Image (cartoon, rainbow, N blue to C red):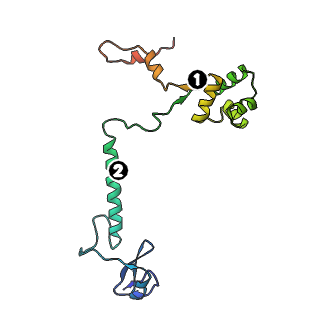
Amino acid sequence: MVQCEMCGAETSSPKTIKVEGAKLDVCSNCTDFGTEVKQPSSSSGSTKYSTGSSSSGGSSTSSSSASSSSSTSSSSGGSRRTDMFDDMDQLVADYDDQVRNAREGKGLSQSDLANELNEKASLIRKIERGDTLPSDRVQSKLERFLDVDLSADGGSSDDSEWSGGSSSGSYTLGDVVKRKD
C-alpha cells in the first residue's frame, strides 16, 4: 500500500495529479485538488538513470541539459568566441593621476570639475583616488573637457613595437624573453 502524498491515507491505487506544478501521487479523495496527469504507456515507467514515476521529469531535464552543454561546447570548438568585453575600451592604468594632473593643470577644484561635467564631486574624488572606474559616459566627458586620452589600446601597441622572430615566422624563447643583465 502507498500513502497519499496529500492527506497521508493509504491507498492501493494512487493517481498522479499536478498541483501548482508539482506532481503528487494521491488517493481518489484528493484527486479534485489538482489536474490528473496521464501516465505514459510504457510498462516499467523507469529509465536507465532514474526509477519510478518521477523518472519522466528527471530524465528529460538531464537530457536537455546534456544537449545544451554539448551544443555550447561544439559551438566554441574551432575558434574563440567574441564576447562583450572584446569590444570594450580598456582604461589606462594611471587614469586617476591623469585626471588629477589635467584638472590641476586647468586650475580647477574637484567640485568645479564636477559642476562643469554635471557630475557629483564625490564621483570625481573617487575617480582621482582610483577607488572607482569611470563609466563610459563619464570617461568621454573627462576626455573631452580635460583633453586627455584615458583609453588604452588593450595591448595592440605592444604587439606593434615587438619585432622579434625569424624570417621563417617561427619564434623561439629567445625572441620573446628580455634578459635582465
**Image location of residue 57, percent across then percent down:** 35, 67
**Image location of residue 15, percent across then percent down:** 35, 82
Amino acid tagged 1: Asp
Residue at x 36% of width, y 36% of height:
80
Cβ atoms under marks 2 and 1 closer than 8 Å: no
Residue in front for this viewpoint, 1 or 95: 95
Q: Is residue 129 above or below residue 19?
A: above
Residue at x 42% of width, y 18% of height:
176
Q: Relative to 5, is 170 on the left or the right?
A: left
CA neighbours of label 1 inside 10 A, class few (<14), some (14 to 19), many (20+)? some
Comes first in the chain, label 2 or label 1: 2
Q: Secondary structure at mark 2?
A: helix
The quarter holding residue 19 reads bottom left
Residue in front for this viewpoint, 65 or 126: 126
Q: Relative to 166, is 88 on the left or the right?
A: right
Amino acid tagged 2: Ser
Q: Which residue is mark 2?
A: 69
Residue at x 36% of width, y 61% of height:
61
Q: Which residue is mark 1?
A: 149
Q: Is residue 45 above or below residue 178?
A: below
Q: CA distance from mark 2 to mark 1?
A: 42 Å
The quarter holding residue 112 reads top right
CA neighbours of label 2 inside 10 A, class few (<14), some (14 to 19), many (20+)? few
**Image location of residue 104, percent across then percent down:** 73, 22
Q: Relative to 174, is 130 on the left or the right?
A: right
Q: Secondary structure at mark 1?
A: loop
Q: Quadrant of the N terminus?
A: bottom left
**Image location of residue 74, percent across then percent down:** 30, 44
